[in-house]
Every structure is written in structure tokens, then in C-alpha cells.
Amino acid sequence: DAGVTQSPTHLIKTRGQQVTLRCSPKSGHDTVSWYQQALGQGPQFIFQYYEEEERQRGNFPDRFSGHQFPNYSSELNVNALLLGDSALYLCASRRGGGYNEQFFGPGTRLTVL
Amino acid sequence: AQKVTQAQTEISVVEKEDVTLDCVYETRDTTYYLFWYKQPPSGELVFLIRRNSFDEQNEISGRYSWNFQKSTSSFNFTITASQVVDSAVYFCALSEAEGNTPLVFGKGTRLSVIA
């Protein structure tokens, strides 16, 4: 049983560009959350998707958007990249309904030059 | 608002020493969950423990133990007889107990165990 997978592993972009990160949840999971982890910091919640809709959102600008597909996989899009967007982006999945454990993927390391 | 504070940024110990990682939290919720995660250099967050706010019993799992004290809003993590493989960044986190609420993480403590 594959866990949470993310692609790509690493990515280098320049300021002003746009980027799309991808996440496949663990089998049986239907809820996906994205977190941003800047260097030396703890992960910060970006948003959560369930039933193809954004259900909760953290304190991130509209440049950060997402999508969830019918197969529960998810994308995180960031427009107009800033140097400060350089971080490890973590995807976490869980089964919706009640409280269920979150499982994290290995992350995508984004570097903005 | 919820907040998690891990005052220790970095800790270095010699192998076989015991080490305690501190975690202090703030929340207005009466029901909540507390967590510890381990992040090795590979980057993936590895779940270690979840504790419900109503359960203040200490827990031991092998060389790991956790001390939850609601009176001081602390949830400390002790590694006994540390090993080099314990070297990682450890995060304490908090979430509401209702539904799929997000995790609020501390800034983490980097533990280095020296052989």
C-alpha cells in the first residue's frame, strides 16, 4: 500500500513564474491538506481539500490555489512566485469524517531564484 | 488562537544520554489533540504520538516517553538512551478535536546525537 506521494521532488523557479505541485493521497484517503515549511520553521497550513472543494484555508494569499480531482489527488498552484515562497511543501492525507490520522508525503522542495 | 512553543532550537547529546524535548501550547479549546512528529533529513514527517486532552496519563513506547501536564500546558518528549538514528528535527503540534482541523506546529527542535 503506497503512502502519500508527491511530485516533483525538487523544483527551481525564478521570481514571477508559476508552479504546480502534485500529491497523490494514501489509498482510502479522501481529504488532502497542504503545508508550507520554510527553512528552520515548522509546517504552516495552507489549505485543505475534500470532495473537490477547498474546505479550510490558512493565512496565505490568493496566489496560492489548489484543486482536488475525482480520484482525490490534488494540486497546489502558486502564481507570481516570490523569493519567500522557497520552502518544502508537504502534502498530508486522511480519511474524512470524524477524527482520522494524517499521513504526510516526502514533500516538494521549491527554490525560487 | 492556538500556538505551540518549542523553546529549544537545537540540542546536542552524546549517544546513550537521555534527552527531553519541551513543548508548551496555548489553546482556548477544552478538547484538543497534541502530537509529536519526527522529521529526518529526508523531509517526511513521521508520526510518533497523538494524545487527547482528556487523557493525562504518561505514555511510554520503547525508548520514547511523553509527559502531558494540562496544568502547565506542556507535552514533553523524552528519549531514553539516545541513539545516532534519533538525530532529526522533532515537532510538537496541536489541533482541535472536532473534524478535520489543521495541525498547528511549533518551530521544531533539532536533535543531534553524537556517537
Image (spheres, rainbow, N blue to C red):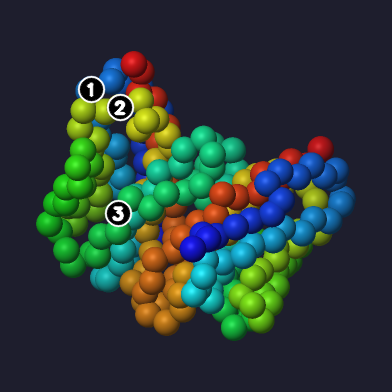
Residue B80 falls left or right of residue B94:
left
The location of residue A75, given as percent across then percent down, is 70, 66
What numbered label is drawn on residue A73?
A: none
Q: In the rendered structure, are the residues bearing label 1 and label 3 in contact, judged by CB atoms less than 8 Å apart?
A: no
Q: Say above or below: B20 vs B66.
A: above
Q: How dense is the environment of label 2, judged by Cα within 10 Å: few (below 14), some, or many (20 and up)?
A: some
Q: CA distance from mark 3 to mark 2?
A: 19 Å
Q: Which quadrant of the rendered structure holds the C terminus of chain A?
A: top right
Amino acid type of the residue tagged 3 in the rendering: Ile
Identify residue for label 1: B16
The location of residue B83, given as percent across then percent down, is 30, 27
Identify residue for label 2: B83
Q: Say above or below: B33 vs A44.
A: below
Q: CA distance from mark 2 to mark 1?
A: 6 Å
Amino acid type of the residue tagged 1 in the rendering: Lys
Q: In the rendered structure, are the residues bearing label 2 and label 1 in contact, judged by CB atoms less than 8 Å apart?
A: yes
Amino acid type of the residue tagged 2 in the rendering: Gln
Q: Say above or below: B74 vs B9.
A: below
